Image: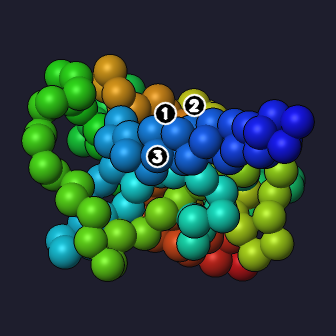
């Protein structure tokens, strides 16, 4: 009976360890390199230093991001051919900034309104197999720390 109790207590721990190792070891998270720093999306909420949430209400947004069809008009453009288009472009290092996409706004975190119209703090152009427009918006807002230019310009 004691062996059964030990087994039932160890199995969940082993499963959690395997899950954590698979998540931490995964390199498929969208990432951008900015000089010596890289900004990477993570699904491990507690490891992220920056939390970004999205809203459908522009009044609740702290940052507005517009999706544009013109790469020349964009502040941030992502164009790639797939997973291995730029190998080692985002190596993990001590200055890596981890960004998570939160389901709900986090105190002190940015709230992004993503749209193809209207005034915007940032304009993004995305043609990618690995990045969604939402992920690109989270990365640029996480990299820039928000800096709501639209609100400052309209005051």
- Camera-side residue: 119 or 74? 74
According to the picture, the residue beneath numbered tag 2 turns out to be 116
According to the picture, the residue beneath numbered tag 3 turns out to be 21
Kindly tell me whether residue 30 is visible in this rendering.
no
- Which SS class for mark 1? helix
Mark pair 2, 1: CA separation: 11 Å
Q: Quadrant of the N terminus?
A: top right
- Camera-side residue: 102 or 146? 102
Residue 55's disc is: none
Q: Are marks 2 and 3 in contact (CB under 8 Å)?
A: no
Question: Mark 1 or mark 3, which is nearer to you?
Answer: 3
Residue 111 x, y percent position in the rendering: 73, 57
Mark pair 1, 3: CA separation: 28 Å
* Between discs 2 and 3, the one toward the N terminus: 3
Q: Quadrant of the C terminus?
A: bottom right
Residue 118 x, y percent position in the rendering: 63, 41
* Between discs 1 and 3, the one toward the N terminus: 3
Kindly tell me whether residue 102 is visible in this rendering.
yes
| 136 left or right of 63 in image | left
How dense is the environment of label 2, judged by Cα within 10 Å: few (below 14), some, or many (20 and up)? few
Q: Is residue 97 above or below residue 3?
A: below
| 79 left or right of 54 in image | left
How dense is the environment of label 3, judged by Cα within 10 Å: few (below 14), some, or many (20 and up)? few
Residue 75 x, y percent position in the rendering: 35, 53
Question: Mark 2 or mark 3, which is nearer to you?
Answer: 3
Q: Are marks 2 and 1 in contact (CB under 8 Å)?
A: no
- Which SS class for mark 3? helix
Q: Which residue shows up at 27% across the image and 71% down it?
A: 93
| 7 left or right of 40 in image | right
Residue 9 lies in quadrant? top right
According to the picture, the residue beneath numbered tag 1 turns out to be 133
Q: Which residue shows up at 40% across the image and 55% down it?
A: 40
């Amino acid at each position: 009976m004691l062996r059964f109790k030990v087994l039932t207590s160890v199995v969940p721990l082993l499963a959690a360890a395997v899950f954590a190792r698979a998540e931490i070891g995964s390199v498929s998270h969208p990432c951008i390199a900015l000089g010596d720093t890289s900004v990477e999306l993570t699904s491990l909420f507690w490891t992220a230093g920056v939390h970004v949430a999205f809203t459908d209400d522009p009044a609740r947004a702290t940052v507005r991001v517009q999706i544009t069809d013109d790469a020349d008009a964009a502040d941030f453009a992502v164009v790639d051919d797939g997973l291995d288009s730029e190998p080692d472009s985002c190596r993990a290092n001590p200055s890596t900034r981890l960004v998570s996409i939160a389901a709900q706004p986090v105190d002190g975190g940015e709230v992004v309104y993503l749209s193809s119209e209207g005034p915007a703090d940032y304009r993004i152009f995305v043609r990618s197999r690995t990045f969604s427009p939402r992920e690109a918006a989270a990365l640029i807002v996480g990299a820039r720390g928000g800096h709501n230019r639209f609100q400052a310009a309209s005051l």
